[in-house]
Image (cartoon, rainbow, N blue to C red):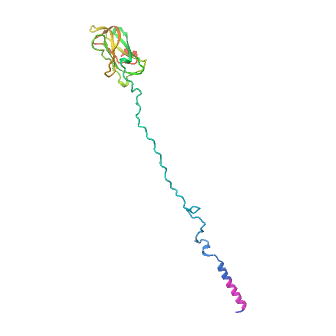
Amino acid sequence: MSTVRRTAVALAALSALALTACGPTGDDTAGGTGTPSAGTPTAGASPSGSAAPSTSATPTAKPAEPAKSSGSKAPADPDFDVFPCGTHDVTFTASLAEPTTSSYLLKITNKGTKACRVLGHPVVTFGALDGQATERGTAPGIEDAIRLAPGKSAYAGLMGGAVDGTGKTVDSIAMTMNTESDLVQTPLKAPTPGLYVSATKNSVTPWVDNAEDALSL
């Protein structure tokens, strides 16, 4: 082989070696699986390298509710302390309404400073005669009884009866109130000149809140 040819072959071999040494490695090729750089943060880690904080939180304790008062309730009925009227609560009058039947209008007026309830029929006795006036008509129950405010009046109709020869004439009557109790009362008296009291026809109505009804029952 000539000297020129040997020199060319040697140069070619050296060039091939130089290209191999300078070529890219397997880790630098596209799609490689090389280990990531230490400066690149991984998913789920904080930039400073510490673990990410937990997202769960401890719930704050709910403050206790104040205890409810166990006090007693006020009475539902605003008139729960309004008691039945007695004779010590009222004034009393009797006025002639119809001479032929010896009918009188009875009237009571609350003279106190507190209201009271007017119950049932008045209890009427005739002077020195025994017994009392018979009841005429139906009185309301205690829940529907008249509430007699201070200065207000209630009325009842008293009928002695027509002169039939069976009765007697009296000049006064006495009245006490129905209190549905054993309350001691002082009878209130009223003059009734020439009142004829029939043994079978005398009667008295329940207390009502107007004079017209008292004389028409």
* Residue 9 is covered by the magenta coloring: yes
Where is residue 209, by image quadrant? top left
Where is residue 25, by image quadrant? bottom right
Give the percent coordinates (x, y) of residue 71.
Answer: 41, 35
Quadrant placement of the C terminus: top left
Count of numbered labels shown in the rendering: 0
Rendered position, 108 above or below 60: above
At horizontal 66% and vertical 80% (from top left) the residue drawn is 19
Q: Is residue 202 left or right of residue 36?
A: left
In-front residue for pair 195/63: 63
Quadrant placement of the N terminus: bottom right
Give the percent coordinates (x, y) of residue 175.
Answer: 33, 15
In-front residue for pair 49/23: 49
* Residue 111 is covered by the magenta coloring: no
Residue 163, visible in the rendered structure:
no
Classified by dominant secondary structure, the portion drawn in magenta counts as helix
Q: Is residue 114 left or right of residue 173?
A: right
Magenta segment: 3-14
Seen as rendered, the residue at the extreme right is 4
At horizontal 33% and vertical 13% (from top left) the residue drawn is 174
Give the percent coordinates (x, y) of residue 159.
Answer: 33, 12
